[in-house]
């Protein structure tokens, strides 16, 4: 992996975590937690989209998949907290 790809993953992860936090909780969780939630959400979203045989390419497609996965992750976490 190059520095550019790692930096891109961190930026997309941070954006995805922040947007998912706004959608699910009404606020973000902080920079580091947004990045973690976004990256884990990207993995979860890729798995979910793969199950449904949906493919999205490019930066926008990656961001959408990560947002969907991060929102699903935050929604599941809220279910288990209550």
Image (cartoon, rainbow, N blue to C red):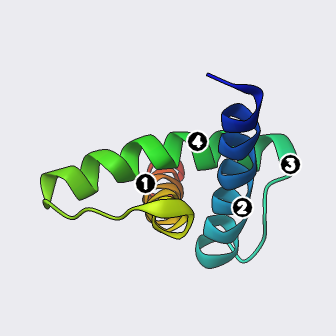
Q: Mark 2 and mark 4: span between their CA atoms?
A: 10 Å
Q: Mark 2 and mark 3: span between their CA atoms?
A: 9 Å
Which residue lies under the disc numbered 3?
A: 31
Which residue lies under the disc numbered 1?
A: 76
Of label 4 and label 1, which has the lower sequence position? 4
Of label 3 and label 1, which has the lower sequence position? 3
| Residue found at x 66% / y 57% | 17
Q: Are marks 2 and 4 in contact (CB under 8 Å)?
A: no
Q: What SS does tag 3 mark?
A: helix
Which residue lies under the disc numbered 2?
A: 15
Of label 1 and label 2, which has the lower sequence position? 2
Q: Mark 4 and mark 1: span between their CA atoms?
A: 16 Å
**Count of number-bearing discs:** 4
Q: Nearer the viewer, mark 2 or mark 3?
A: 2
Quarter assignment of residue 53: bottom left
| Residue found at x 66% / y 54% | 12
């Amino acid at each position: 992996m190059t520095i550019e790809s790692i930096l891109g993953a961190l930026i997309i992860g941070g954006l995805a975590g922040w947007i998912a936090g706004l959608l699910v909780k009404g606020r973000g969780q902080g920079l580091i937690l947004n990045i973690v939630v976004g990256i884990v959400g990207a993995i979860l979203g890729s798995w979910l989209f793969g199950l449904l045989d949906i493919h999205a390419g490019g930066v926008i497609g990656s961001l959408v998949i990560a947002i969907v996965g991060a929102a699903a992750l935050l929604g599941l976490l809220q279910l288990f907290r209550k």
